[in-house]
Amino acid sequence: MTVATQPSSLTTEVDPSAALSVRNLWKIFGAGSDKIIGTPDADLSRADLKEKTGCVMGVKDVSFDVAPGEVFVVMGLSGSGKSTLVRLLTRLIEPTAGSVLLNGQDITSASEANLREMRRKQVSMVFQHFGLLPHRQVIDNVAYGLEIRGMGKKERRAKAQEIVDLVGLTGYERSYPDQLSGGMQQRVGLARALAGDPAMLMFDEPFSALDPLIRRDMQNEVIRLHRELGKTMVFITHDLAEALKLGDRILIMRDGEIVQIGRPDVIVGAPADDYVREFVSDVPKSHVLTLRWVMRPPKADEGVGGPTLQADQVVREAARAVLEAQGPVRVFDGDELVGVVDDEDILRVVVAEEGQH
């Protein structure tokens, strides 16, 4: 199926270096949905659109790029369109309009054979429901994708063992899924996704059913694996704390539309509207904001001879050095002096935080 790209006010320029380029992507559920785009009905609220046409707006004119090696988090409440979006990215559901380019290849116009090849080799998905094969041991669950590719048993077992060791499942190779905890089962799901060495991993709320402590361990596991493997990751979540912890950048959705895209410190420090402001109101700002947000322009020779810090250092991590310094601390962006910060600048953030609670 070839999907028509509709005109939009958003840029259609594609970044050739992007691992993933999404342009003017729409998904409208219901009969006659393809007739809505480009008409006044497309601007109706979800409720009004449904009442007038019977159609439901899933994703509305979404465009963004994901850089190679980036952890890109899509966040929103239930019904915001985030899970619909991730399914559109691999054409598990068909878009109404728009384009999705994965490493330069337009998957919205790909043949079924090319699409299967892309899903098999270029991108792997990790879902909330693990989908493990109950009658297969861990090692064979991990190797399943390699088996489908036709890899020999000895070779795929060796590869699967490497990945089992990588995700902390050593010693559980011969266990069956029902012998494992939820967190361990999710590690098997993660290992299976990694076994085929995909260029990109997509996570659809993979940890939302896990207990808080196990969830935190799995978040740390994703951070560690990203540090070691450098994979491009698209991560869907409804949890702001999870988004802030994992994301290099965060896309916030509401009613199928993008509300804001930015680094965690930008989302918290400069929310785009009241919706985002309300979302981040309880976030401890010292845990997210960097020194860029609290520094001031330096006066002549201010802080010379004292300690120095980098502008992208998080306020909480920099606090001790600043509070122990005899005077203002100079802040650099690489080799360039960009500001100074002192006790008052740090305490202003911390005291404001205390006032929140």
Image (cartoon, rainbow, N blue to C red):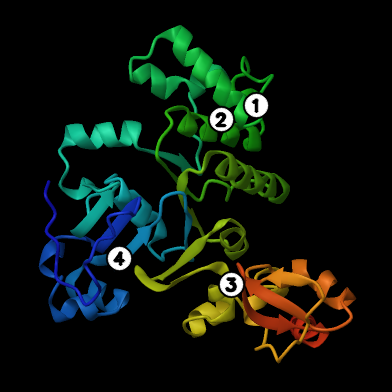
Q: Is residue 11 above or below residue 343?
A: above
Q: Which mark is residue 265?
A: 3
The total number of labels drawn is: 4
Quarter occupied by residue 315: bottom right
Q: Cα distance, mark 4 to mark 2?
A: 33 Å
Residue at 67% over, 22% down: 170
Type of amino acid at the residue the image marks with label 4: Ser
Residue at 57% over, 51% down: 208
Q: Is residue 349 above or below residue 105?
A: below
Q: Nearer the viewer, residue 293 or 281?
A: 293
Mark 2: few/some/many CA within 10 Å (<14, 14-19, 20+): many
> Label 1 near label 3: C-beta < 8 Å?
no
Q: Between disc 3 and disc 1, whose residue precedes?
A: 1
Left or right: 89 as drawn, with respect to 300: left
Residue at 34% over, 37% down: 122
Quarter occupied by residue 21: bottom left
Mark 1: few/some/many CA within 10 Å (<14, 14-19, 20+): some
Per the image, the residue denoted by label 2 is 188
Give x and y (percent) for residue 250.
Answer: 49, 64
Q: Between disc 4 and disc 1, whose residue precedes?
A: 4
Q: Cα distance, mark 3 to mark 4?
A: 21 Å
Mark 4 residue element: strand
Per the image, the residue denoted by label 4 is 63
**Can residue 135 be seen by looking at this rendering?**
no
Type of amino acid at the residue the image marks with label 2: Val
Q: Which mark is residue 169?
A: 1
**From the viewer's perspective, is the residue at label 4 or at label 2 nearer?**
4
